Amino acid sequence: MSKKDHKVEIWTTDGAKTELHTTAEKARRCEDLPFIDPQVTQVTVTPPKQR
């Protein structure tokens, strides 16, 4: 099972911000949201800190 260690922040046209912690695979999919969903204005993915 993959760790949910990537932080994803999603901003929408109404100014709302959603923050979630997810796996690397789902985080990569979230990066495509601004191109797929016109309501999404920006997506920021923060990977876990390297040790």
Image (cartoon, helix red, strand yellow):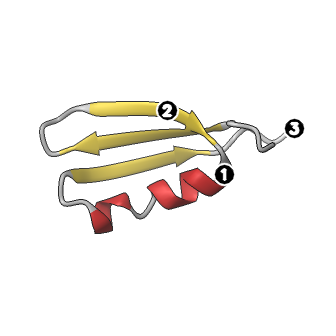
Which amino acid is tagged 3?
A: Arg
- Crowdedness of circle 3 by 10 Å Cα count: few (<14), some, many (20+)? few
Q: What's the residue at 22%, 32% (across, down)?
A: 16
Residue that label 2 marks: 20
- Helix, strand or loop status at disc 3: loop
- Between 46 and 22, which is closer to the camera in this rendering? 22
Marks 2/1 in contact by CB < 8 Å: the verdict is no
Q: Compared with residue 7, is residue 37 higher up or lower down, i.e. above or below? A: below
Give coordinates of residue 45: x percent, y percent.
52, 47
* Sequence-wise first label, 3 or 2: 2
Res 31 quadrant in image: bottom left
Q: CA distance from mark 2 to mark 1?
A: 12 Å
Looking at the rendered image, the disc whose residue lies closer to the viewer, 1 or 3, is 1
Give coordinates of residue 39: x percent, y percent.
18, 52
Q: CA distance from mark 1 to mark 3?
A: 17 Å
Marks 3/2 in contact by CB < 8 Å: the verdict is no
* Image quadrant containing the C terminus: top right
Which amino acid is tagged 2?
A: Leu
- Crowdedness of circle 1 by 10 Å Cα count: few (<14), some, many (20+)? many
Q: How many numbered dots are placed on residues in this image?
A: 3
Give coordinates of residue 42: x percent, y percent.
31, 51
* Sequence-wise first label, 1 or 3: 1
Which amino acid is tagged 1?
A: Ala
Residue that label 3 marks: 51
